[in-house]
Image (cartoon, grey):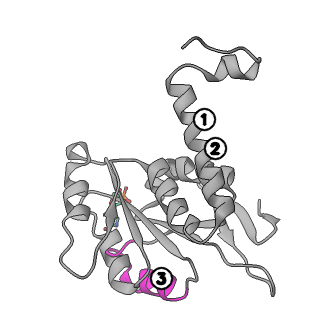
Amino acid sequence: MIKSGKGFKDYAVEGFRIREAICPVGVEMAKVLIIVGSKNDLELTKDSKEIFDRIGIDYEVKIASSHRNPERLRKIVENSDASVFIGGAGLAAHLPGAIASLTEKPVIGIPISAALLGLDSLFSIVQMPKGVPVACVGINRFDNAAILAAEIIGIEDEKVRDKIKELREELRMESEGESSFKKVGFKTKG
Ligand code: C2R
C-alpha cells in the first residue's frame, strides 16, 4: 500500500518500508538520500530512519548497486537534490565510492556485515583515493551515519543542531541509566 504525506510517499518492498520524496511545487526535496546495494540491506536502514524522523530531516531510501546496475545509480545520484548522500553496502562495497565519484556533495559510507565480519566492506569504503573522500562510519552504524548527516545539515540549521543536542543528551542519560528517573521526576545521586 502506498501512503503519502507532506513531501513523501511510503511503500513497502518485500516487507520493508521505503520512504521516497515526492516534490510538488513548493515542497523541498529530501535532504538526505540513503542508497543501499541490495534489498537485503533494507532492514538496517531503520536505524537511520529512526534518527531522521526524530530530528525531522527529510530523507529517502533507494536500492541501487554500482556493480549490478551502474546506470541506475548514476541517474539516481545525478537527479537527486539531496545535500548529503549515505551509501550502505556489504562485501566488496564500492557503492559509497561510486556515489562519491558522481557528486561533489558529502558522502557517508556504511560498511555492512555480510561476510568476513564486515571487514571486507569496511576496507573497501574507508580507503578511498585522494580527491574522492567518503566519510566512513562503523560497521552497520546506520544510526551514526544519520547523526553525521544531520550534523552536516545542522551547520546551516539551528533547529537541527538543537535536536541533535537533545538526542545526545538522551543517549547520555540512557547510557548512565538516568532516563527512567527523569521521566517520573526523580533526581539521581551525584
Ligand atoms: P545480495 O544479498 O543482493 O546478493 O547482496 C550489497 O550491499 C549486499 O550487502 C549482497 C551484498 O552485496 C552488496 N553490494 C555491493 C554493491 N552492490 C551490492 N557492495 C556495490 O555496488 O558496491
Question: Percent position (x, y) of residue 104?
Answer: 40, 85
- Highlighted magenta segment, given as a residue range: 65-79
| Mark 3 lies on residue | 77
> The residue tagged with tag 1: helix, strand or loop?
helix
Q: Earlier in the sequence, mark 2 or mark 3?
A: 3
| Mark 2 lies on residue | 166
| Mark 1 lies on residue | 170
Q: Quadrant of the C terminus?
A: top right
Question: Percent position (x, y) of residue 63?
Answer: 49, 67
Identify residue type, mark 1.
Glu
Q: Is mark 3 within 8 Å of ligand 1?
A: no
Residue 85 shown left or right of residue 113 in the figure? right
> The residue tagged with tag 3: helix, strand or loop?
helix
Q: Residues within 10 Å of mark 2 (few under 14, many from 20)?
A: few
Question: Percent position (x, y) of residue 11?
Answer: 70, 61
Identify the residue at the far front of this view. Answer: 190
Question: Percent position (x, y) of residue 121?
Answer: 25, 56
Q: Quadrant of residue 173?
A: top right
Identify residue type, mark 2.
Glu
Residue depicted at 28% across the width and 69% down the height? 94
Residue depicted at 60% across the width and 35% down the height? 170
Cβ atoms at labels 1 and 2 below 8 Å apart: yes
* Residue closest to the eye, 96 or 42: 96
Q: Nearer the viewer, mark 2 or mark 3?
A: 2
Residue 99 shown left or right of residue 35 in the figure? left
